[in-house]
Image (cartoon, grey):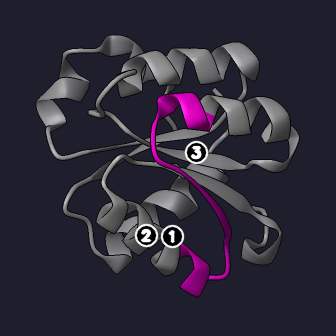
Amino acid sequence: MPRPALTTILIVDDDTLVRNAAAAVLKKLGYRTIAAKDGEEALGIFAEQAAQIDLVMLDLRMPGMQGAEVFHRLLGIDPNARIVIATGTPEAIDASPELRDYAAGFAYKPYGLSDLASVVKKALESKSP
């Protein structure tokens, strides 16, 4: 498993409070974080820095480009990308077999420190899709 100090996580969430809280928790755990407020920004960052990004935490429901579309585009850039889906509506995951089959993990909002730490650790330890 990558060491936290050498691990970069891209956090994609349109909710500023959620995005900042997740970044603060992950930084406290020793990870480097990059934040994106929407799918378009995330895709731009990932296209430029995919080799340095070890994990993407992706909100499923965002205005504009939805998380499922961002998910597919991220995999188009890097088919081995590790992506954790963050959502407050678990039934959205059930409706999409591709998300269930290819996501590295799921973080159900509202998530706490231990939940987030566990999901991230498991996703980083998992084999690439």
**Magenta range:** 26-42
> Which residue is drawn at the image coordinates 78% and 77% (left, top)?
5
Can you identify the residue that label 3 sits on? Answer: 56
> In percent of the image, x 28 and y 74: which residue is there?
112
**Kind of residue at badge 2:** Asn
Are dots 1 and 2 in contact, CB under 8 Å? yes
Q: Residue at x 28, y 15 (%)?
A: 96
Q: Is residue 114 above or below residue 2?
A: below
Q: Mark 2, mark 3: which one is toward the viewer?
A: 2
Tag of residue 47: none
The tag earlier along the polypeptide, 2 or 3, is 2
How many neighbours does mark 1 have within 10 angstroms: few (below 14), some (14-19), or many (20 or more)?
many
> Is residue 10 placed above or below 4 in the rendered structure?
above
Q: Tell me where residue 6 sits by quadrant.
A: bottom right
Residue, far bottom: 28
Residue 41: % across, % down: 58, 36
Badge nearest the viewer, 3 or 1: 1
C-alpha gap between disc 2 and disc 3 = 15 Å
Q: Amino acid at mark 1?
A: Ala
Q: Which residue is mark 1?
A: 23
- Name the secondary structure under disc 3: strand
Per the model, the C-alpha gap separating discs 3 and 1 is 12 Å
Alpha carbon of mark 1 to alpha carbon of mark 2: how far? 5 Å
Left/right of residue 97 with respect to residue 118 in the rendered view: left
The disc labelled 3 sits on which kind of residue? Val
Residue picked out by circle 2? 20
- Quarter of the figure with the C terminus: top right
The answer to if 47 sits in the magenta stretch is no
